[in-house]
Every structure is written in structure tokens, then in C-alpha cells.
Image (spheres, rainbow, N blue to C red):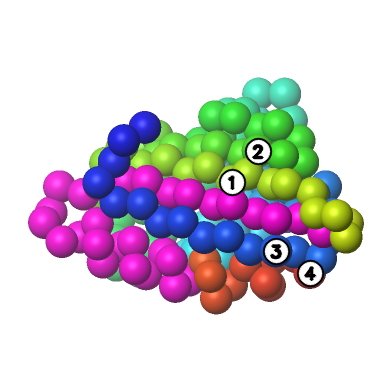
């Protein structure tokens, strides 16, 4: 999935993967993480937060857009992409969870995207990196 702009954040939680996965997969929990207004659009095909679940995000003055979960492997992997609207192009996100030896979880989170307006992708990338890095610790212990 090549894209010109990537955001990459790692974070270590003291909570086990099932707790972190539950927090990350619940759309309503993510508003503070992205500094966005988030609403659930639809539940997943076979579970509330599984494949097919969709959220609407509104970031500041930008138009709202929708992200849909495309992969959901309990306690280990969430992948999503923009499926409707938004100023970004080719947007995708991958959250990989790895258990740590002390019972915690290592999160490796990568987001990729481009924007049709020159310079917008770089601005969004900096804002996302800052917001995610600052707010991940509030998502789960």
C-alpha cells in the first residue's frame, strides 16, 4: 500500500492484548485519540467492531469522512481505510498488537495517505502523530 505520507507510532501498554484490542476496536473510544468527533455508522458483518464496522470522523473544519474496518484479528490486528469522503486519498491504517513478556502489549500503528492539495498531507501527518502519541496512554493503561 504505497503512499507518500506515513505516520508511525509505537506505544507500550501495561494491559494485555485483549484489553488494548477492545479499546482500539471500539469506535466510540477513539475520539480523544484523534482529537475528532466520531460516530458509529454501522456495526461489523459478524460482530459489533469487526470487519465492515464503520465510523464517521469529523476533524476540526475538515469535512467528515468514513473509515471502515477491513481486517479484525482479535487481540492482534486491526486494519481500516477511508471508504467515503474526506480530503485524503489512499488512506489506510494498521494497528498491530504484540504481547510483551511482562503481560503488556506493544502497539505498532502505521497510517498512510496522500492529499490532493499540496502540503496538506504533511500537515495532517504532523497533527495525527502528535495527537496519537499524546493520547494513546488514555485509551488503556
Residue at screen point 37% across, 46% down: 112
**Residue 18 image offset from top left, x and y in percent:** 83, 47
Closer to the camera, 116 or 110? 110
Q: Residue at x 41, y 64 (%)?
A: 128
Packing grade of label 2 (10 A; few <14, some 14-19, many >=20) is some
Question: Spatial distance from mark 4 to mark 3, Cα to Cα?
Answer: 9 Å
* Foreground: disc 3 or disc 2: 3
Residue 76 image offset from top left, x and y in percent: 72, 39
Mark 4 vs mark 1, CA separation in Å: 17 Å
Answer with mark 3 or mark 2, whichever residue precedes in sequence: 3
Q: Which residue matches tag 2?
A: 77
**Residue that badge 1 annotates:** 95
- Secondary structure at numbered mark 2: strand
Q: Are marks 4 and 1 in contact (CB under 8 Å)?
A: no
Q: Residue furthest bottom?
A: 134
- Vertical placement of residue 107 versus 54, above or below: below
Q: Quadrant of residue 59?
A: bottom left
- Marker disc for residue 141: 4
| Disc 1 and disc 2 in contact, CB within 8 angstroms | yes
Residue 131 placed where, x, y %? 48, 71
Indicate the quadrant containing the C terminus: top left, top right, bottom left or bottom right. bottom right
Q: Mark 3 touching mark 2, by CB under 8 A?
A: no
Q: Residue at x 70, y 32 (%)?
A: 73
Q: Is residue 18 above or below residue 48?
A: below
Question: Which SS class for mark 4?
Answer: loop
Lower position in the chain sequence, tag 3 or tag 1: 3
Q: What is the C-alpha distance between the residues marked 3 and 2?
A: 15 Å
SS of the residue under disc 1: strand
Within 10 Å of disc 4 (Cα), the crowding (few <14, some 14-19, many 20+) is some
Cα separation between marks 3 and 1: 13 Å
Residue 12 visible in the picture: yes
Q: Verify whether residue 112 appears in magenta.
A: yes
Amino acid at each position: 500500500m504505497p503512499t507518500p505520507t506515513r505516520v508511525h507510532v509505537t506505544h507500550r501498554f501495561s494491559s494485555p492484548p485483549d484489553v488494548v484490542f477492545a479499546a482500539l476496536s471500539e469506535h466510540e473510544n477513539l475520539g480523544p485519540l484523534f482529537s475528532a468527533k466520531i460516530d458509529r455508522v454501522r456495526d461489523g458483518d459478524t460482530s459489533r467492531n469487526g470487519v465492515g464496522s464503520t465510523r464517521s470522523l469529523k476533524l476540526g473544519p475538515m469535512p467528515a469522512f468514513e473509515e471502515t474496518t477491513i481486517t479484525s484479528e482479535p487481540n492482534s490486528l486491526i486494519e481500516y481505510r477511508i471508504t467515503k469522503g474526506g480530503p485524503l486519498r489512499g488512506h489506510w491504517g494498521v494497528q498491530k498488537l504484540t504481547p510483551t513478556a511482562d503481560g503488556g502489549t506493544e502497539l505498532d500503528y502505521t497510517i498512510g495517505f496522500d492529499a490532493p492539495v499540496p502540503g496538506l498531507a504533511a500537515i495532517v501527518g504532523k497533527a495525527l502523530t502528535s495527537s496519537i502519541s499524546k493520547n494513546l496512554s488514555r485509551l488503556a493503561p
